[in-house]
Image (spheres, rainbow, N blue to C red):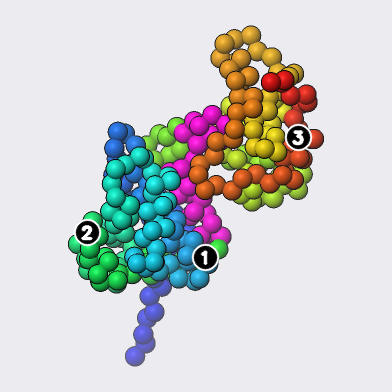
């Protein structure tokens, strides 16, 4: 008798669609990033170890720190903040716990030494490093991107709008596709950065070219960026000095404004 083997693998499109459809609590019109942060933590563990398994006892503090750094200000206790996504992500069909515990309760997670992991089908698919990287980018872009120069963080529904990935050293000139060669910039400041109106100093302050001119109040607001500290999201990789040096020498229209 022939046995038919059912292929339970997920396509890259299915994986990205599942991760893009997380149900998230909203407050004041803004979505809480608790679930995406848990997925990103599990993705990091999967990439490092080959397993997405997280232990509540060992890893809830890391999750609480991420929620504190990237989430909205809250008076909720750290362990309670971490318990929300650790128990509720199950309802999205991408997260499993090794035992059944009540939603949102910290004590059962602690006393029963609960382990959580991504759904096995999802985990198998995400062992592909390229797909894991694409999934992480999708989550970061949809949840956490804001302009490192002005803080713009526009969203239309679940989609980030007006914020783009900018290379410091251009890809066409051997610029690597790495975190230390990238900035999240709004569309305006991306264009100004690529045309040399804006630059970066080695102490990570924005520089404005003295050759830039504008007649309107809105245009002249660009001058106010001069010597403002770079303002990326907490935890992002800072630009590498070598890439800043390249941009300053090859793109930025010297001299910079005087203080």
Please say whether residue 220 is visible from this viewpoint.
yes
Lower sequence index among marks 2 and 1 = 1
Task: Give the spatial CA distance, label 2 vs label 3.
Answer: 52 Å
Q: Nearer the viewer, residue 37 or 80?
A: 80
> Residue at (48%, 47%) from the top-left corner?
140
> Residue at (37%, 87%) from the top-left corner?
2
Q: Which mark is residue 47?
A: 1
Against 230, residue 1 (above or below) is below
Left or right: 110 as drawn, with respect to 40: left
Q: Nearer the viewer, residue 25 or 133?
A: 25
Lower sequence index among marks 3 and 1 = 1
Q: Which residues are magenta?
A: 130-153
Residue lying furthest bottom in this view? 1
Q: Which mark is residue 248?
A: 3
Where is the N terminus found, in terms of image quarters? bottom left
Q: Nearer the viewer, residue 159 or 107?
A: 107
Q: Is residue 175 magenta?
A: no
Give percent across and percent down for residue 92: 30, 56
Label 2 environment density (alpha carbons within 10 Å; few <14, some 14–19, many ≥20)? some
Quadrant in the picture for residue 106 = bottom left
Q: Secondary structure at mark 3?
A: helix
Quadrant in the picture for residue 4 = bottom left
Q: Which mark is residue 105?
A: 2
> Residue at (29%, 43%) from the top-left corner?
75
Q: Secondary structure at mark 2?
A: loop
Left or right: 42 as drawn, with respect to 29: right
Label 3 environment density (alpha carbons within 10 Å; few <14, some 14–19, many ≥20)? many
> Residue at (53%, 67%) from the top-left corner?
48
Where is the C terminus found, in terms of image quarters? top right
Q: Are marks 3 and 1 in contact (CB under 8 Å)?
A: no
């Amino acid at each position: 008798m022939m046995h038919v083997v059912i292929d339970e693998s997920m396509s890259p499109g299915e994986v990205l669609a599942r991760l893009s459809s997380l149900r998230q609590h909203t407050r004041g019109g803004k979505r809480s990033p608790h679930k995406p942060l848990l997925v990103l933590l599990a993705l990091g563990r999967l990439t490092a170890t080959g397993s997405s398994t997280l232990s509540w006892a060992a890893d809830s503090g890391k999750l609480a720190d991420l929620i504190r750094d990237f989430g909205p200000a809250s008076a909720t206790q750290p362990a309670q903040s971490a318990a929300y996504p650790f128990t509720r992500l199950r309802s999205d069909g991408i997260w499993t716990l090794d035992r059944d515990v009540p939603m949102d309760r910290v004590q059962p997670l602690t006393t029963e030494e609960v382990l959580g992991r991504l759904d096995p089908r999802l985990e198998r698919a995400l062992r592909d490093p390229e797909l894991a990287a694409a999934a992480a980018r999708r989550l970061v872009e949809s949840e956490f991107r804001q302009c490192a120069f002005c803080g713009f963080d526009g969203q239309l529904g679940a989609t980030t709008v007006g914020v783009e990935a900018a290379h410091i050293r251009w890809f066409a000139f051997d610029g690597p596709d790495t975190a230390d060669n990238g900035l999240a910039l709004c569309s305006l400041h991306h264009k100004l950065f690529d045309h040399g109106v804006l630059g970066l100093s080695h102490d990570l302050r924005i520089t404005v070219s003295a050759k830039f001119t504008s007649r309107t109040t809105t245009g002249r607001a660009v001058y106010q960026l001069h010597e403002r500290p770079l303002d990326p999201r907490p935890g992002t990789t800072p630009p590498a000095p070598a890439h800043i040096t390249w941009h300053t020498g090859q793109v930025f229209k010297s001299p910079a404004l005087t203080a």
